[in-house]
Every structure is written in C-alpha cells, then in structure tokens.
Amino acid sequence: ATFLCAVGLNIDTALTSADITLDNGSTGTITQALSQKQYGRVFISFGTNEMGWPYIDTFKEHYSELVKSIAELQPNAKIYCVGILPLTASQDAKGESVNNTNAKTFSNAISEVAAQLGYNYLDCSAAVADENGYLPEDASTDGIHMTSEYCLYWQNYIIDNT
C-alpha cells in the first residue's frame, strides 16, 4: 500500500498542502503524488480533524472537490470514501467537538458525497466498535487514535470488504 498523508492534513488543505512525500523523496501535493502512477484502488479517509467545523456543507464541498480531483487523476481506480471510526466513551463524554455524534454526522456527509458522485462508501465501524458503538478504551491512548492492534482490525475489515 502507498499512504499519502501528512500530520494535520485536513479536507480544507488536502489539495494545496505540499507536505506529501513523493516518490523521489521530495514533498509535494496529493495531486502531484497521485500523478506519479496509477492505482487500482484509492481509499479516502478524512473527517476526524474536521469534526469541529460548524458548516457541514463546507466540508461536503471540499470533500467533493477532493474526490473529483482524485477520480480525474486516477480514472481506472476504484474509489472508496471511508467513514469516520467511533471514539471511546471517555472521549465522547468530554463534550468536545470530537465525539461520536459528530463522527456519525460527518460520516453521513461522506456517504452522501460518495452516493452523489457514484463512488463507494465504506463504514468500517463494525471492525472496531464495541457492543455500544464505542471504540473500546484499550483500543486507544487518547480516545481518538487507535493502537496498532486495532488498526489491524480496521485494515482487515477493508481487505475483507473491498
């Protein structure tokens, strides 16, 4: 797998940030990185960093723009728009914007964009959620980011469902 990522990258800066490592070791944009070769599948995972945004329509506009740009650069790739994973109950109880209600709201927005543009939506929550829909407390050190063990559950769910 090739991962095109950078710390703090969000849907607002995804197309303009020049922090993505390119094949030659330099940095550039996602569009530059996606122009280097063709992929069979592309998984788009954004939303956790954006859960505090007050305007879901703005998120959907930026997300749509990103998906369209990726589709243009990767015309033969199967594109998957990945929903936001659940958070732990302790993180959810903090009452901050990074909570399960917002995760579901933004995941619904991602699902709507995928359907509108004709791409696949992938809800991976079942791979990591407990019986109450939360990420188990031992699955994360901060309530948001998963341990490597739980990342493997997520990875295997993607492999099994795509």
Image: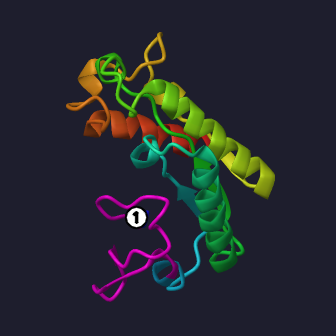
Residue furthest to the left: 141
Q: Position of residue 125 (x, y in %)?
A: 51, 29
| Point 64% across, 64% down: residue | 67
Identify the residue at horizontal 50%, vertical 85% (top origin). Answer: 36
Say whether residue 16 is magenta. yes
Task: Please state the horizontal and vertical placement of residue 108, each as a whole percent of the image.
Answer: 64, 36
Does 36 sit above or below residue 63? below
Is residue 162 visible in the rendered image? The answer is: no
Residue 126 colored magenta? Answer: no
Nearest the eye: 49 or 31: 49
Q: Position of residue 28 (x, y in %)?
A: 38, 83
Quadrant in which residue 90 is drawn: top left
Q: Quadrant of residue 1?
A: bottom left
Circle 1 residue: 3
Q: Is residue 146 left or right of residue 14?
A: left
Residue ranking furthest to the top? 131
How many numbered marks are there?
1
Q: How is the image coloured?
A: rainbow
Q: Residues within 10 Å of mark 1 (few under 14, many from 20)?
A: few
Q: What residue type is disc 1 on? A: Phe
Which residue is rendered at x = 64% and y = 49% of the image? 57
| 158 with respect to 49 (left or right) | right
Q: Main secondary structure of the magenta part?
A: loop
Q: Which residues are magenta?
A: 3-31
Disc 1 secondary structure class:
loop
Q: Is residue 145 left or right of residue 84?
A: left
Task: Residue at 58%, 72% (x, y): give it.
Answer: 39
Given the current orientation, which residue lies at the most extreme front position? 54
2 above or below 122? below
The answer to whether 54 appears left or right of 58 in the picture is left
| Residue 30 seen anywhere in this rendered image of the structure | yes
Q: Name the residue nearer the viewer: 52 or 21.
A: 52
